[in-house]
Image (cartoon, rainbow, N blue to C red):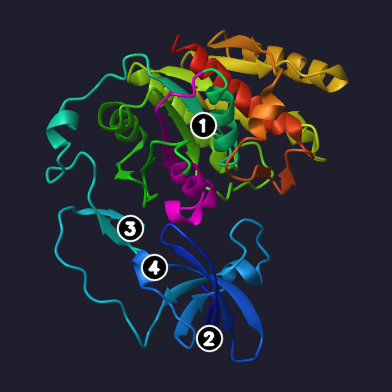
Amino acid sequence: MITWREGIVVGLGRAWSTAVQLSVRLPDDSVVDALAYTDLVGSPEPGDRVLLNTNAIDRNLGTGGSALVTALPDRLPPTPPARPGHIVKARYTPLQTMLLGVDEQESPHHELLRDADDLAGLPVVAADLHSAVPAIIAGLRTVRTDATIAYVMTDGGALPAAFSRTVDGLRSSDWLAAVVTVGQAFGGDLEAVNVHTGLLAAREVVGADVAIVAQGPGNLGTGTRWGFSGTSAGEALNAAHTLGGRGVASLRVSQADARDRHHGISHHSVTAYSRVALVPADLPVPRLDGAFGAKVSAQADDLVRSSDGRLVRADIAVDGLLDALRTSPVGLRTMGRGLEEDAASFLAAAAAGVHAADLLA
């Protein structure tokens, strides 16, 4: 179901990558925030009439809580010139887009990737939430500032990479060497069919020392054991192991979440790493202080036991990691909370980055 509206652009806001924020006046004279992807619909200007999908604001969503521009009906963008590539993403939706896949026949990387089958021990950090990505990199950089890092963005959350201001900030600050969008996700530096080809592209094309696999912004969860999009973290570990990589399971931890299932180590991590992942992987556990630290440690022990020995625990000191997290070129927020409100969340992700960097020694 789509809730359709039309309106007039009355103001332009922040722009990044191929996204721009707008203010749009509706027929009832109310003004709503909207987002336009300029590579899909063109570049709106004040006075333009726009068609909107308003599901997000009608349902009061958190991440992505703005209207989306679906068309500039009176000023359509010009027909693009012919170019290589026939990979279609957001397939069979009104805004499906055709792109050049990194490994398809028209790609300059086709021969390199045609028979590629081995990550050769590449550390692959899997994370549940998009918000973990900058924290993982911050931790990694405390050990290896020169590491080449690729982000493999899966399609469990936002499909356009351009939706993420985090990705834009990490790329422009050179904290990320490249973004590889996989599955139905699109708009990265490279496009891949699935996590397997995305990881191979990260190693062979980007030359990554470490790959981070996580969904885009907008984690989906239903409050049930299995109903959450972060199961992809376990699937990423399976892919990494199959291709000869070294899987690193970044824990989702919270000291501030009021929901018992997410306090300490989230049940999302427990399910993804003990039930979805069926292969060996490293489990970095931050050494946190006090009763909360003891709780996380005990939960980690339970998680290792429930994995039938597939997970290997690595205890990581967090000394200095808060200072490292504060150097992030992008804001750190998870589930509406910042670093000062839920430090444990970011420390756990940073610990995974430290461990991945240690594997490069």
Three-letter amino acid code at disc 3?
Arg
**Residue positioned 41% across, 61% down in the render:** 18
Distance between mark 4 and mark 2 Cα atoms: 17 Å
Name the front one of labels 4 and 2: 4
Mark 2 residue element = strand
- Quick one: label 1 or label 4, which is nearer the N terminus? 4
Residue name at image x 70 percent, y 32 percent = 345
Query: What residue sits right under mark 4 in the picture?
Result: 38
Residue 191 appears at what percent x and percent y? 30, 45
Q: Circles 1 and 4: CB distance less than 8 Å?
A: no
Q: Which residue is mark 1?
A: 233
The amino acid type, in three-letter code, at marker 2 is Gly
**Which mark is first along the chain, 1 or 3?**
3
Q: Is residue 165 magenta?
A: yes
Q: Secondary structure at mark 1?
A: helix
Q: Which mark is residue 183?
A: none
User: In the image, is residue 302 above or below residue 255?
Assistant: above
